[in-house]
Amino acid sequence: MKTKIMFVLSLLFGLMFVNAGLNKFFQYLPLPDDLPESMLKVTEAFTTIGWLMPLVGLFEVIGGILFIIPKTRALGAIVILPIMVGILLTSIVHVPSGLPLAATLFLINLWVIVEHRAKYVPLITPKS
């Protein structure tokens, strides 16, 4: 049962990031009308830096695909972690109404990292 829940959550999580990443390239989703002024300024600043949003989008697509595939899910969780931290902090500072979704996604990402913690041990274990 736990593996089925993990698969469904990972599939939805990964697809959400693939969609968000593709949107950074093709801009097919409109900005919500009720965005706070501070968030509009942040979005404008990020888009002024021409290479930033495509780079984030690329990592969202790659991380999302890796997250969906069970064999590469641990790597996908690490690739998406810095983006997820940025989403969480942006929700806390600029758009508190998005905090429940951001916190839920962050917890799913942490759950996957904890479930695959044995795969990360060789990265932090010093060789003798």
Image (cartoon, rainbow, N blue to C red):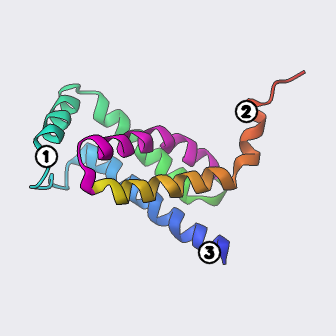
- Where are the magenta residues, as a range? 72-97
* CA neighbours of label 1 inside 10 A, class few (<14), some (14 to 19), many (20+): few
Badge 2 local density, few (<14 within 10 Å), some, or many (20+)? few
Establish if 47 lies above or below 12. above
Give the residue displayed 19% in from the left and 56% down from the top. Answer: 29
Q: Considering the whole magenta stretch, tell me its main secondary structure.
A: helix
43 shown above or below 96: above
Q: Return the x and y of residue 126 as percentages of the image width and height.
A: 81, 24
| Residue at 47% over, 52% down | 106
Q: Which residue is mark 1?
A: 36
Q: Nearer the viewer, residue 21 or 78?
A: 78
Q: What amino acid type should be assigned to the residue bearing mark 3?
A: Lys
Q: Residue farthest to the top?
A: 128
**Drawn side of residue 27 relative to residue 110, left or right:** left
Frontmost of labels 1 and 3 is 1
Residue located beneath label 3 in the image: 4
> On the image, numbered disc 2 is attached to which residue?
123
| Quadrant occupied by the C terminus | top right
**Amino acid residing under circle 1:** Pro
- First in sequence: mark 2 or mark 1? 1
